[in-house]
């Protein structure tokens, strides 16, 4: 089955039939059919919020098979955990910071 999910969901939209289970309402007590926990899926941060974040520093990067940066691990001001951002977005939004990081990372690799 293919689901029509919102574009900001970071979940594949195709589910195999063998992984799905039917849902049955509890006829005796309908309240038992209501889950007590929060949904497992988490929406990605809205692009408006993400665009307004201020970067503290780029911590490290991941490269593809050609040695080009694919993702950067970024520490944001006011956020505790760093997260991975795609290189093309970082180069668009923070070109000077990415260039400075690449220069220092290249100097460390060559040393």
Image (cartoon, helix red, strand yellow):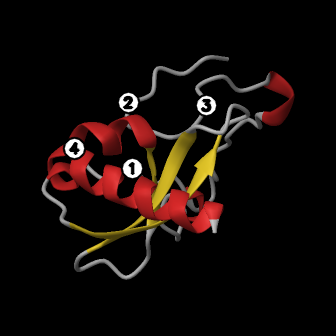
Image location of residue 53, percent across then percent down = 19, 61
Regarding residue 99, the answer to whether it shows in the image is yes
Secondary structure beneath label 4: helix
Q: Earlier in the sequence, mark 4 or mark 3?
A: 3
Secondary structure beneath label 1: loop
Image location of residue 107, percent across then percent down = 52, 63
- Circles 3, 2 touching at the beta carbon (< 8 Å): no
**Marks 4 and 3: which is nearer the front?**
4
- Circles 2, 1 touching at the beta carbon (< 8 Å): yes
Q: Which residue is drawn at 23% across and 76% down?
A: 77
Q: Earlier in the sequence, mark 3 or mark 2?
A: 2
Q: How far apart are marks 2 and 4 (CA)?
A: 24 Å
Q: Label 1 belongs to which residue?
A: 43
Task: Judge left or right: residue 98 versus residue 86.
Answer: left
Regarding residue 94, the answer to whether it shows in the image is no
Q: Label 2 belongs to which residue?
A: 6
Q: How far apart are marks 4 and 3 (CA)?
A: 27 Å
Q: Earlier in the sequence, mark 3 or mark 1?
A: 3
Q: Which residue is drawn at 73% across and 35% down?
A: 22
Q: Label 3 belongs to which residue?
A: 12
Q: In this view, does 92 lie above or below 72?
A: above
Q: Label 4 belongs to which residue?
A: 93
**Marks 1 and 4: which is nearer the front?**
4
**Marks 2 and 4: which is nearer the front?**
4
Q: Distance between the residues labelled 1 and 4?
A: 22 Å
Q: How far apart are marks 3 and 2 (CA)?
A: 11 Å
Secondary structure beneath label 2: loop
The quarter holding residue 69 reads top right
């Amino acid at each position: 089955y293919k689901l029509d999910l919102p574009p900001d969901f970071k979940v594949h939209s195709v589910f195999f039939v063998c992984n799905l289970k039917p849902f049955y309402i509890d006829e005796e007590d309908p309240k038992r059919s209501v889950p007590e926990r929060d949904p497992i899926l988490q929406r990605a941060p809205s692009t408006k919020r993400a665009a307004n974040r201020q970067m503290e520093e780029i911590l490290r990067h991941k490269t593809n098979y050609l040695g080009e940066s694919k993702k950067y691990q970024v520490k944001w001001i006011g956020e505790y955990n760093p997260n991975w951002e795609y290189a093309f977005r970082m180069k668009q939004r923070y070109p000077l910071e990415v260039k400075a990081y690449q220069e220092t990372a290249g100097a460390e690799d060559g040393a």
